[in-house]
Amino acid sequence: MRLKVVLLGEGRVGKTSILFRYIRNEFQEKQQSTLQASYMDKKIKVGTTTAQLSVWDTAGQERFHALGPIYYRDADGALLVYDITDSESFTKVRKWVKELRKIVGGDINIVIAGNKIDLERNRQVEEKEVLEYAKSVGATHFYTSAKQNLGLEECFTDLATKMVQQNLTKLQGLAGGFQPKGGKSKLVVVDDTGEGKKSSGGGGCC
Ligand SMILES: Nc1nc2c(ncn2[C@@H]2O[C@H](COP(=O)(O)OP(=O)(O)OP(=O)(O)O)[C@@H](O)[C@H]2O)c(=O)[nH]1
């Protein structure tokens, strides 16, 4: 099962760092700003299902905001990242949630990550506010540190679990759609040649 995740959030909150730490276990103190979106793949196991995650990193700077839909419109899930030392970056999360719900729809899976938890002493975003907000929009919230490799496995596992469950439910729904009301499935052959009698009786082919 292939699943697409998009990382969204204000510039400098740590999206690229989260991606590099989660997939390659690398971290750079002087990570450059993203100018072009890119993605990395990772296999993840959820129960008995193996999913191939394509995790897309997007540019957070405001001037790139209009590009957002290109990356998120066919996403199965979004990881919305803010920096716990920057309250503006949390305000931006609220905007992303509204935008995603409006454009992609209510069923996109959302996880919120409060990054840079290693800088707790400089915290600007109140925990109570974040947790209440996350609950109100049906998202889960995790604290992460790309620098110290904290919370990332939990974050992606939670998002992957939601996406896999949603996909399995959709697949079951589709399979159910082919079941005739009577229960047993029947193959109905529709003859559109106008010579139905000829082909159905004789046992010959074509
Ligand atoms: N202390 C600390 N610094 C971090 C952490 N994650 C990222 N950084 C630093 O924050 C800065 C910005 O990180 P990026 O990963 O480039 O942030 P981004 O959200 O991808 O930024 P844009 O590409 O501009 O959207 C870099 O200097 C990182 O080293 C973290 O968990 N803790």
Image (cartoon, grey):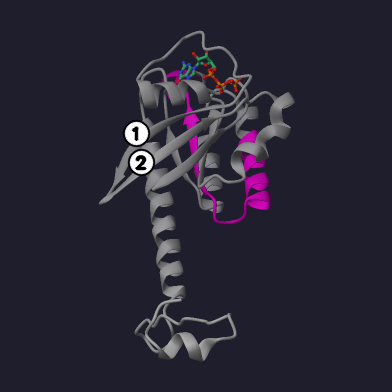
Helix, strand or loop at disc 2?
Answer: helix
What residue is pinned by disc 1?
153
Q: Position of residue 19 (x, y in %)?
A: 45, 26
Q: What is the distance, in whole Å, between disc 2 and disc 1 at their CAs? A: 6 Å
Over which residues does the magenta segment extend?
92-121
Q: Position of residue 59 (x, y in %)?
A: 62, 25
Label 1: how many Cα within 10 Å (few below 14, some 14–19, many 20+):
few
Q: Taking 20 as reference, is 30 above or below it?
A: above
In the rendered image, the residue lying farthest to the top is 30
> What's the amino acid at mark 2?
Thr
Q: Is residue 10 left or right of residue 191?
A: right
Residue 80 part of the magenta segment: no
Residue at figure coordinates x 38%, y 16% from the top left = 26
Residue at figure coordinates x 63%, y 26% from the top left = 60
What residue is pinned by disc 2?
157
Q: Quadrant of residue 183?
A: bottom left
Q: Position of residue 14 (x, y in %)?
A: 52, 22
> What's the amino acid at mark 1?
Glu
Ligand 1 under 8 Å from disc 1 Cβ: no
Residue at figure coordinates x 64%, y 40% from the top left = 96
Q: Quadrant of residue 32?
A: top right
**Total marks drawn?**
2
Helix, strand or loop at disc 1?
Answer: helix
Q: Position of residue 116 (x, y in %)?
A: 47, 22
Between residues 204 and 187, which one lies in front from this camera angle?
A: 204
Between residues 121 and 145, which one lies in front from this camera angle?
A: 145
Residue 99 part of the magenta segment: yes
* Image marks 2 and 1: residues in contact by CB distance under 8 Å: yes
